[in-house]
Amino acid sequence: MKKILFSLKITYALLIIIIAFITCTNAVGLSVFTFIAFGFYASLATMIVFLTRRIALSLVITSSLLIILQLLNQIKVHYYKERLFFSDFYVAFDPKNFSTLLHYPSASLYLFALLIFLIANIWLFRTEKKISQLSRWGSLLISIILFCGIVYVSKQAHVNRLWQQYLPKGRGTIANLFISSNQFTYEPPIFGNSSAYFLDKLSTFQPSISAATPVLTKKPDVVVFLQESTVNPQLFDIPSSNVPSYEMFSQPNSNLMRVQTFGGGTWLTEFSMLTGLNTNDFSYRKNSVYYVVAPHIQTSLFKEFNDNGYFTVVLSPMGYGNYNAGPAYTSFGMQKFFMPQDLGYAAEQNENLWKIPTQDLLDRVKMILDTYTDKPLFIFVLSMNEHGPYDPNFVDETQIESSVTDKQFVGRFNDYLSRITPLDSATQDFSRYIQHRQNPTLFLYFGDHQPALSWGGDYKTKLSAADYLTQYTLTTNYPSSVEHNELTDVSLVSGLILEKTGVQYSDFYRANIAMRYLCDGKLDDCEDKQLVESYKHYIYQDLQDAGQLIQH
């Protein structure tokens, strides 16, 4: 019996090691990336040998850790459709974000299962005979040599350039993590060789921009409303007439909007809306833009409105430190941060309000508009009640089960609609309030990303990457032209806001607004790729809007 158990134990250990080796060979073929992956495996294994003096235990621990990293990568791909990079740990290990991460019970269960997997493997091989002290110190020397070799190779400029050519997928989980972890010095994105092509096009569109700008005797108040996890349910190609239509999605100035995240990552859409920059431009730094990139940003909606004499405010149901949003807003020029509790909402101070009714939230916006009247106001407000996760067992009130094969989607979809219905009511109530205000006011509301409903079907659009589509609607209580594009990039919507308020704006936003005209609202979707490269060269290299380029 002991021999059988021993054989099973050895077989299990070999299986774990083989799976880990497969993980290391995610980079195709023999390359510098496979050297980094296998070198990291060997370096970690020999370091654990030094710490434990047990070879089999060290190999199993190392293999288990690499498998866990691969599974974490797959969890991120499942939830966000993106690979795991080192910068993601800025978000995951920030204590202020723990309550948000734990809001996803299934993800927390996965993480707990991975921890149990690691502990169980350690327990199984804990009693192995120890190696000699000489071998132990030899393993430390090997670990240090290998680690230094990996650090040296991964810091080489040509290796980094080669790796970035394979983004957004990269070259395997280990290489992605290791190379991206070496980027301690921030550098802005680099695009194209010249801005001449864009600047030549820019000069031809000034009359069109001026014609669309309203002439007002008083600066309008501006409210920009981020609707959490919100997309028009009519976008899903569900073969049923029971999917409801909502008034907030069918206004004259409603348009599809391209975002850069799916199922989560609200801060990515916030960043693009508030700065006019595309988070994809920052490649592996994308998910840490609020930590790493925000302090370097030179222009934002907050700063533009500050320069025009506005009082700039954020109203958020989440705390100041959540996803480092508050410090990022401050970097962008925000003057005042409110939570609903600061405006009379009955809840513990600084508590994250996951279930605050959107009507209660927008009522607090009305309070701000009615209270701070000595200056024009720019208010950025975020809802939360529409946030997932969604119940797969929710009752099928829309009766779409007969036309949709995925029964869990049916439940989630109906749960989602139960949250969108009060959002629609609250949004329309606020729109009516705006229309009856004496002060000129612009109100723009938009969806930050699609909800994670596990939809596997088609969408009612011919546009590519339809799962990265939401929408925005712009309304005013003063005369303003209506804009209709097939698609508008979220990075270009802030320029639209400035244009429709008639305020003065910087060279950056002059370019941002012109780009919207030149590409009919598109940015990375624009057919003229030379124009996109030239435009991004202008904003990043000429204007240095994301910080100064380091000369090597």
Image (spheres, rainbow, N blue to C red):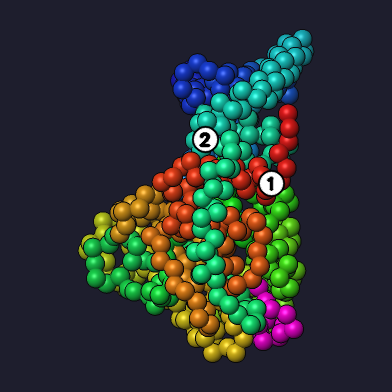
**Bounds of the magenta segment:** 365-378
Name the residue that disc number 2 marks: 167
Number of numbered discs: 2
Q: Where does the image place residue 158, in percent across and percent down from the top left? A: 61, 23
Q: Is residue 409 magenta?
A: no
Describe the element under mark 2 as helix, strand or loop. Answer: loop
Question: Going by the image, does 441 lie left or right of 400?
Answer: right
Where is the C terminus found, in terms of image quarters?
A: top right
Quadrant of residue 439 within the rendered picture? bottom right
Q: Is residue 150 above or below residue 411?
A: above
Which is in the foreground here, disc 2 or disc 1? 1
Q: Where does the image place residue 36, in percent across and percent down from the top left? A: 60, 22
Which amino acid lies under the numbered mark 2 shown in the image of this protein? Leu
Q: Is residue 228 visible?
A: no
User: Residue at point 61% right, 46% down?
Assistant: 538
Q: Is residue 368 magenta?
A: yes
Q: Is residue 70 above or below residue 512?
A: above
| Mark 1 closeness class: few <14, some 14–19, many ≥20 residues within 10 Å | some
Describe the element under mark 1 as helix, strand or loop. Answer: loop
Q: Is residue 74 above or below residue 346?
A: above
Q: Is residue 187 above or below residue 480?
A: above
Q: Nearer the viewer, residue 491 or 287?
A: 491
| Mark 2 closeness class: few <14, some 14–19, many ≥20 residues within 10 Å | few
Q: Is residue 201 visible?
A: yes
For the residues labelled 2 and 1, the Cα–Cα distance comes to 23 Å
Q: Nearer the viewer, residue 364 or 348?
A: 364
Q: Nearer the viewer, residue 306 or 233?
A: 306
User: Residue at point 52% right, 35% down?
Assistant: 167
Name the residue that disc number 1 marks: 544
